[in-house]
Amino acid sequence: MFRRLSILASLCACAGAMLAQDLSTIQIHGFATQGFLYSSSNNYLSANTSAGSLAWNDGAVSVSDSLSDKLRVGIQLHVYQLGDLGGPTLQVDWATGDYKLNEHFGFRAGKFKIPIGLFNDSQDVDAVHLWALLPQSIYPNDNRSVTLSAMGGEFYGRAKLEKNAGTLVYRAYAGYRPLDLNGGYVKSLDLDLAALDVEFGLPVTLVSDAPPGNIFGGDVRWQTPLKGLLVGFSAFDQDIHGSGGAIVFRVARNTVTQQYAQFERGKFFVAAETRRMPVTTFATVTTAGGPVLIPDPLDWRSWYVMTGYRMSEKLQLGTYYSRFADAGAGAGKDPARISNCSRDWTVSARYDFNSYFYGKLEEHFFLRQAGRALRPRHRSRLLRRLEPERREAAVQRSGGQDRIQLLARFED
């Protein structure tokens, strides 16, 4: 059985989008957006969308300067609100020093944007996209800060291939990132930990310190000899760890792979991406009877295909189909795992009134297996309480330590 959810998203009031002022070598850019969300039934992205919500806005200002022909520095400050996420606190999206020796070798250090797929390092700049919401199976707005940027270093460059075989653009990086305490991932952890606290009769404790994690990886894209065709591959390793009260949680080191392709010709473009993220999460609960370890293996697989056409200088139309599923261990036996699949068909229109002001109108049709209401990812990871008799059957004694296999899986 499928549930259908329709969302109407309108983005407007973008005065000053990508406004630039050149003061000698200093460049200042900025944008501001205001969105409206309405859904036919279920709430979405932590906002009260079933009644219509204006709780969706973004703003950023960036400043950069070329200190020499090879050295450039810059910073971008960002503030956002999306339902219960974000708030008035200014955040540093990126702040780097960038030294480019030549076309083949450059290095930037500081807080840098992470190159993953087609849109990861530009997903926070709404003005460059046709879409109000990028495909949520790969670029979820509520978890955007998890892979947007990291503190560390990045090597980059490009090389022209022989015999007119195109150009390779390559980037490699390593860094560290604390998660956004007001972002969707931490909100999800709060819900999960609160459910476990209640289950084990412990005081409810939320995450108070931003959970840290390491990330390293690379991206290679081939600008093919066929004009307009780009093919690429991204891969990265990451982990996350932290605690909340009597619970210690850990996302084991995992490798995420992403393949993508894009073709542009004149007023037309088409693009597609796939991503796979196999990962196991662990929570260790300290109880009076000793520690209880709760593992959960996941295998998240996502893909989308999109296309768009510029009808005129001011009007652009597009559509995409996006799918997310969990194919983790036991998926063929666990009804909760089988149902963890969502699909999104989207139609979008963008109209540029002038160089500084534009509007977007977008509608999403979400399909959800097993008749479950579609919920945003940061809301959906709440663990359902285990019934006492099922919980007892799930406990396995191993060296004096309890091991519980979760009977309810994460939902998208």
Image (cartoon, grey):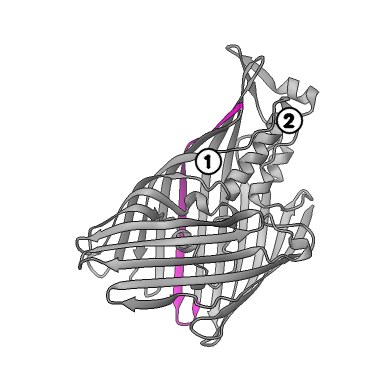
Picture quarter containing residue 20? bottom left
Q: Nearer the viewer, residue 294 or 113?
A: 113
User: Looking at the rendered structure, which numbered label has been put on residue 278?
Assistant: 1
- What is the three-letter code of the residue carrying label 1? Pro
Between discs 2 and 1, the one toward the N terminus: 2
Residue 347, image x and y in percent? Answer: 65, 72
Q: Find numbered disc 2 in the image and state the secondary structure of the residue it sits on.
A: helix
Q: Residue at x 59, y 76 (%)?
A: 13
Residue 320, image x and y in percent? Answer: 60, 67
Q: How far is disc 2 from disc 1 in space, using C-alphas?
A: 29 Å
Does residue 250 belong to the magenta stretch?
yes
Q: Of all residues shown, which one is farthest toward the bottom?
A: 312
Q: Residue at x 42, y 62 (%)?
A: 76
- Using the image, determine if residue 268 lies above or below residue 302: below
Q: Residue at x 67, y 52 (%)?
A: 376
Observer able to see residue 166: no
User: Looking at the rendered structure, which numbered label has been put on residue 220?
Assistant: none
Q: Find numbered disc 1 in the image and state the secondary structure of the residue it sits on.
A: strand
Does residue 57 belong to the magenta stretch?
no
Picture quarter containing residue 15? bottom right
Residue position marked by numbered label 2 in the rendering: 198
Q: Nearer the viewer, residue 192 or 56?
A: 56
